[in-house]
Image: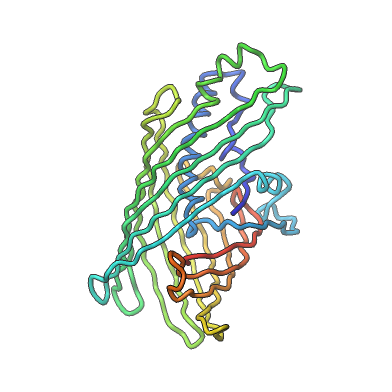
Amino acid sequence: MFRNNKNYSVYLFLLSSFVSVPMCAAESALDSIEESFAISTLMSDSEALTFGFTNFDIESDDPGFGDEDSSNYKNSLNVFVIPYTWDLEPKSEAWDHAITARAFYINTESDSEIYSGVADTAKQETMGIYGNYSQFYHVTDSWYVTSALGFHLTYYSNDYEYGGGFPEDAIDELDGDTLNISAWAVIAEPEVGIGYERDEQWGTWRAHNKTNYIYGQSFAGTINDKFSVNPEGWRITNGVEFTVGVPELWGVNDFLTIDFRRIDLFGDLEAMADDGYYYETSVGWVIDTNNQIPFLDNIGIGVSVNYGSSISGATVVLYWNE
C-alpha cells in the first residue's frame, strides 16, 4: 500500500532552520518527531485515511486535489498496514464488543539540501503494533453509540546522509541530537462515537460521528532525552456510508460500499492538513469470504479520492476486513 504527502513537515524536518538557530532547530525536530508519532496513528487507521497501491493525479486547478509536490511525495511514501478484528460473544442483543489488532510500517525517503549545493538524503520510518477493545451499543433499532480504548507501541527513526561538502562542525551539532536518532513511544487512544443506521430496499446507510484522542510518552531510543517526546492530538470524523447489495457472483455475497467523510484535526495531527481538515470519498466493491479464508473476512477493490490533506489525490485501493 502506497501514498504521499504534500506537507513536507509531516515526515521531513524543517531542515533549513537547523543551521542558523540551533535551539529552535532542536525544538523543530522534537515537534517533527511528535508529529510523526501522532500521524502514524492516523495513517494506520483505515477509518481515518485510505491508502492504495496505484496513485493517479486529478486534473484540476484546485490545489486541494493535489499538486506537483504532493504527486512527487506520494511516490516516496510507503505505508503497510495489516489489521484484524475478533468479534466477541455479544453481551446482549443490543450490546456487541470486539478486539482489534494491527501492525503497520511507514517510511519515506527524499532528497534534501540544508547547504546550497550540498545534496543530502533524508530517510524516516515509523513502525509499530496497535490493539484496542471496542464496544457497540444499540440505543434503538437505528441509533447506536460506540467506545474504544487502544494503545500503540511505536518505533520512530530518521537517517540523514550528509552530502559531500557538508560542514563538519554542523554535523557534530546535528548528528545524534536532531538527526540520525530513534525513539520508542507508547500512545494511548480512547475514542467515542455515535451513529444512525437504517435499512433500505437497496441496502443500508449510516451517518456517523467519532472522536479520537491520542497522548503518548517516549521511553527509549538514541534520542538524548528519552522522555522528551509527547505526541498529542485529536480528530473528529463525520461521515455518511452506503452499503448497496448487488447480485451474487460465483455463489458468494458481495456489495458496493460508498463512503463520504470529513476529518477535522487538532494538535500534532494538524500537520496532515494545511486547513486543519480534509475530505475523503471512497467507492469500492467488496466480496465476503464467508469465513473460508483464515483471518480474511472480506476482500475488494475500489477508488478513493482525498481532498485537502497532505496526501491529496486519488488512488486505487485494496479492501480487506472491511
Rendering quarter of residue 217: top left
Way the structure is coloured: rainbow
Q: Position of residue 231 (x, y in %)?
A: 42, 38
Residue furthest toward the bottom? Answer: 201
Rendering quarter of residue 196: bottom left
Residue furthest toward the left? Answer: 91
Quarter of the image where the N terminus is located: bottom right
Q: Is 234 placed left or right of 308 in the picture?
A: left
Rendering quarter of residue 154: top left
Q: Position of residue 109 (x, y in %)?
A: 63, 38
Which of the two residues, 117 or 66, is positioned nearer the viewer here? 117
Relative height, residue 56 to residue 119 (above, below): below
Residue sitting at x 45%, y 38% = 155
Residue sitting at x 54%, y 51% = 80
Relative height, residue 315 to residue 108 (above, below): below
Residue sitting at x 34%, y 74% = 143
Q: How many marks?
A: 0
Residue sitting at x 32%, y 60% = 134
Relative height, residue 89 to residue 174 (above, below): below
Q: Is 237 placed left or right of 219 in the picture?
A: right
Q: Position of residue 185 (x, y in %)?
A: 39, 37
Q: Is 195 placed left or right of 27 in the picture?
A: left
